[in-house]
Image (spheres, grey):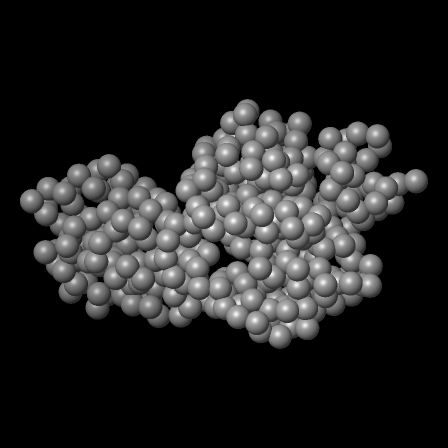
Amino acid sequence: MKLDKLVKELTLEVKTCRECLQKDITGAYVSDLLSDVMANSRDGNIWITLQTHMNIVAVAGLKNLAGILIVGGRRPEDEIIRKAEEEKVAIMTTPMPAFEAAGRIYQMLQ
Amino acid sequence: MLKEFRADLHIHTCLSPCADIEMSPMAIVREAVNKGIDIIAITDHNSAENVIASQKAAYDSGLTVLAGMEITSSEEAHILALFENADSVLQLQDRIYENLLPGTNDERRFGEQIVVNEKDEVSGFNRRLLITATTIDSLSMVEMIHSLGGLAVASHVDKGTFSIISQLGFIPDDLRFDALEMSPHIDREQSGQKFGEYNTIGWITSSDAHYIRDIGHRTTSFFMKNPTLAEMTLAFKNEDGRRVEWK
């Protein structure tokens, strides 16, 4: 499934890298600990998190994740958006809490 | 006779991936002396490999350089460990390296981790993934720091990321920090309103400098006899007239 489909179905707000929406999603990983994501996420996962520290961009790039979905209505700062555009990392936001976002993505991936 | 010592106890060198390459021992010492600071602490992420060089660079300058480290607990809370002697922080470093999550630094994404000598000459690069966390939880970390004779300070508790409060929700009673650090984003009055419940522990503020110009942007004044950890401990506890002040 392409990221694009997820964005439309769940009406996610795309904050960065519109061209990244053509990427395929291999699955999802839910975690707010950067070290855990570095250790356990997989190539092509969409990362569901409320973490908005600058380092999320580097971690998503390092692990070649499909994108970052920031939940709970949290907003990434301008500096993060700039860096994510530069590094071609898709950041999306949603007012949904992590449980709901993960549940809906899980269903779509079945 | 008590004197005022101005301290900036949270400074990163070029060993921290996120710090500027100009953050070398001589440059840091020069800036601190120029700004009238009496005590600094070198606190790189999960490593202390530039501590000895920084202490040597300050030789004869009148500046006290504490041997420190900013450690990432398993819950991703940042904790400052402060010692007088480099030996102690290097002992702690051994334990940290044993328990740091594996990985190699990706310099392009995270930044270079430069080890230097006291003349600001590059002596090598640290290849470990210093940006990641250790497998040691906060409680064990604080106990480990204390067992080596150091002070444990909770970093930037007002911040929404990597602070003990952002990671654990609140500071549990059994977590015996010697002090809490407030970031430059919050003043003394706001800190009082937000963190009043933790007023039995000492509070400090520091620059968390990653760039030369940030050094001394925030300092904490210690009123004490001499610039030692023992005196600082008394100041945190408001004992024997020793005290801590900042705005």
Residue B153 in the image, given as x and y percentages of width and height: 61, 40
Q: Quadrant of the N terminus of chain A?
A: bottom left
Image quadrant of residue A23? bottom left
From this view, report whether residue B53 is shown above or below residue A28.
Answer: below
Which residue is rendered at x = 59% and y = 30% of the image?
B176
Residue A74 visible? The answer is no
Name the one closer to the observer, A91 or B2.
Answer: B2
Q: Residue at image x 33%, y 68%?
A: A87
Mark yes or no: residue B49 visible: yes
Report whether B7 appears left or right of B23: right
Q: Is residue A84 above or below residue B168?
A: below
Image side of residue B208 versus residue A69, left or right: right
Q: Nearer the viewer, residue A84 or B94?
A: B94
**Compared to B83, does B119 lie above or below?**
below
Q: B87 or B18: which is nearer to us?
A: B87
Q: Taking A72 as reference, is B156 left or right?
A: right
Outermost left residue: A110
Residue at horizontal 71%, vertical 48%? Answer: B84
Residue B143, position in %: x, y? 56, 33
**Residue at 60% of width from left, 69% of height from top?**
B116
**Count of numbered badges drawn on the protein:** 0
The residue most toward the top is: B173
Q: Residue B182: x percent and y percent?
A: 61, 43
- Residue A64, how many percent across, how many down? 25, 62
Q: Is residue B127 left or right of residue A105?
A: right
